[in-house]
Amino acid sequence: MSHDQLSWTFGALADPTRRAILARLSQGEATVSQLAEPFHLRLPTVSKHLKVLQRAGLVKQGRKAQWRPCRLETAPLKEVAEWVDRYRAIWDERFARLDDYLLELQQKETDSGHK
Amino acid sequence: MSHDQLSWTFGALADPTRRAILARLSQGEATVSQLAEPFHLRLPTVSKHLKVLQRAGLVKQGRKAQWRPCRLETAPLKEVAEWVDRYRAIWDERFARLDDYLLELQQKETDSGHK
């Protein structure tokens, strides 16, 4: 895997537990223990996932002594949205063509029904 | 890495060469040789990348004997867009708050300038 920002981000998102952690953090800050609980994960496992998310810049962890809450950082997600948006025109066009085709089929059926 | 569809897709996108192959295919179908050329890659390297893209359903390869063109499949990209869109509201709100804050700072400076 190459080490450009977008590759780190996509790599970090390629795991359902890490995506679930992001979904939890989208509701608000949480400590490592609070993150572990709903997923029934051991703390070292959560820490490992958090490291991958932090390396991608998707999560930042506070530096307060006792309570070190994790926080979602949205900038890399915005970059993902911008990247994928370039393909939006292509799938929109393909779905539109499919619609046209289905309409054409339907029309043919209606026409043959009238004969 | 877990083997759900979205994880395969994100995993496949976590490489700049694979993303460049998709960008090339967004312009139209291409053979493996045509894909290798602009990136100065060896054919086995391209084939390896294509396998990862195919596993994620991002590329399909034709079955014609000589000319087996690769084609971009947009369904997994649409899924990525839908996934990331859930976070759009969060970053929009954060940027709006940042705007408000900067406006407030500016206002304070203007006010102190008038005193």
Image (tube, coloured by chain):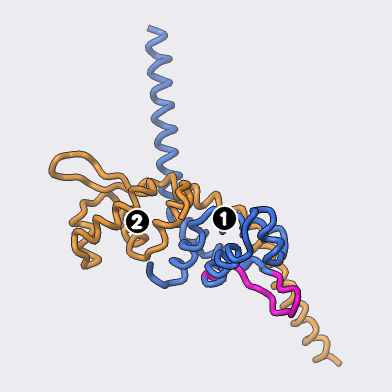
Chain colours: A orange, B blue
Q: Circle 1: is it few (<14), some (14-19), or many (20+) Cα within 10 Å? A: some
Q: Tell me which segment is drawn in magenta.
A: B56-69
User: Where residue A69 appears, x then y in whole percent?
Assistant: 23, 47
Residue appearing at x 44%, y 39% in the figure? B95
Residue appearing at x 21%, y 54% in the figure? A32
Question: Can the viewer see residue B92?
Answer: yes
- Amino acid type at circle 1 is Thr
User: Where residue B51 appears, x then y in whole percent?
Assistant: 55, 70
Which subunit holds the residue at mark 1? B
Q: Quadrant of residue A35?
A: bottom left
Q: CA distance from mark 1 to mark 2?
A: 27 Å
Residue appearing at x 21%, y 51% in the figure? A31
Please give the residue where the numbered disc 2 appears in the rendered image.
A22
Q: Residue furthest left?
A: A66
User: Where residue B70 appears, x then y in whole percent?
Assistant: 67, 69
Q: Of helix, strand and loop, which one carries label 1?
A: helix
